[in-house]
């Protein structure tokens, strides 16, 4: 199988048939073996029944149906698990992503491991969708060090060896380029067409911004300290404990040499608190190190990723 196209759907009954027709037209012109994986994310309308009708007439289609709505990240993860293609393309099912851009992604991935779409001329409301997205993209690029104009674009292409190493949860699908950067993948970005939504209702809202920020903290921590938690917690603990020690040393000098009372000084409580919290942070770091060690040893999970092996192997 050369190509797998993964499309999550949630209450998109009005868009399914035109999406499938346009997608088939593009994929048939490529002249390669392909499959289309539609993931029904617990839709409450006729989405699933329409997908079943399409699958009955088209052997290249696979339908995955969730028992309830698990979210877009879970839908992508399920599609990745079942995809058989050497290249996996993801896109939204609301017809705002254009299937005609798929050949452009396939050309770019010949020299890259991951290609992300860039909705340069985005057809969405500015204040409710585009402005929060611009802020989020800038913040994610700064924090993760992987600079992309449009993290939220679902139209992406991946090599199979990239997605097989990914474990997605929460709202992590938008951070795949940043998470994959840990494996040293080559990431590229291409401009794609973006259409206004003509049918159905958008599933995105301003509340997603908060989720993005929280998941960004998780991604940054995993990106930098997933295999060495003590370096994070220990640094914070030693820093806080050292400041607390200096405060108590200062108060001790005032008490012993200047005879000033320190019992009611707020600095006394602050110094003691910083030392206690510092010790707790170091303890958390040690516990984290034990958990990481047990995880890697019991799961036999390596702390490296090979690109290729040349020569005789064991």
Image (cartoon, helix red, strand yellow):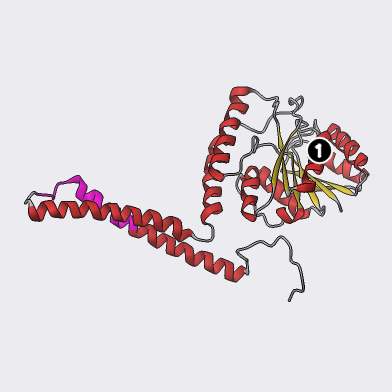
Q: Is residue 304 above or below residue 139?
A: below
Mark 1 is surrounded, within 10 Å at the Cα level, by few (under 14), some (14 to 19) or many (20 or more) other residues, namely some
Given residues 279 and 207, the one toward you in this image is 279
Residue 122 position in % (x across, y down) = 69, 27
* Residue 273 drawn in magenta: yes
Indicate the position of residue 262 as horizontal and vertical percent values: 13, 49
20 sits left or right of 227 in the view: right
Residue at left 54%, top 69%?
A: 294
In the rendering, at what x and y percent does residue 238 appear?
Answer: 35, 57
The answer to whether residue 204 of the structure is visible from this angle is yes
Instruction: Determine whether 230 is above or below 61 in the image.
Output: below
Vertical placement of residue 252 versus 287, above or below? above
| Nearest to the observer: residue 120 or residue 88 | 120
Q: What element carries label 1?
A: helix
The quadrant in which residue 287 appears is: bottom left
Q: In this view, does 133 lie to the left or right of 54?
A: left
Would residue 191 be found to the left or right of residue 204 on screen?
Answer: right
On whether residue 8 falls in the magenta region, the answer is: no
């Amino acid at each position: 199988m050369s190509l797998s196209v993964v499309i999550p759907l949630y209450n998109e009954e009005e868009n399914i048939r035109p999406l499938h027709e346009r997608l088939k037209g593009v994929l048939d012109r490529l002249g390669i073996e392909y499959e289309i994986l539609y993931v029904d994310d617990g839709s409450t309308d006729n989405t699933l029944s329409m997908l079943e009708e399409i699958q009955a007439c088209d052997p290249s289609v696979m339908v995955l149906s969730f028992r309830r709505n698990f979210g877009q990240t879970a839908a992508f993860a399920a599609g990745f698990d079942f995809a058989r293609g050497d290249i996996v393309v993801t896109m939204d099912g609301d017809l705002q992503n254009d299937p005609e851009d798929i050949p452009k992604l396939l050309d770019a991935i010949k020299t890259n491991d991951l290609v992300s779409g860039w909705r340069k001329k985005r057809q969405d409301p500015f204040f409710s969708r585009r402005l929060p997205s611009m802020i989020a993209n800038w913040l994610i690029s700064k924090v993760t060090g992987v600079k992309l104009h449009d993290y939220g674009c679902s139209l992406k292409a991946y090599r199979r060896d990239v997605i097989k190493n990914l474990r997605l949860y929460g709202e992590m699908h938008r951070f795949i380029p940043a998470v994959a950067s840990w494996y040293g993948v080559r990431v590229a970005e291409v401009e794609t067409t973006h259409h206004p939504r003509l049918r159905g209702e958008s599933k995105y809202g301003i509340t997603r911004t908060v989720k993005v920020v929280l998941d960004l903290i998780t991604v940054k921590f995993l990106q930098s300290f997933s295999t060495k938690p003590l370096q994070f917690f220990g640094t914070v603990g030693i820093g806080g404990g050292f400041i607390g020690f200096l405060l108590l040393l200062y108060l001790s000098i005032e008490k012993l040499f200047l005879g000033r009372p320190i019992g009611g000084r707020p600095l006394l409580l602050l110094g003691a608190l910083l030392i206690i919290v510092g010790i707790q942070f170091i303890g958390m770091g040690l516990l984290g190190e034990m958990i990481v060690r047990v995880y890697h040893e019991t799961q036999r999970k390596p702390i490296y990723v090979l690109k290729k092996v040349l020569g005789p192997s064991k």
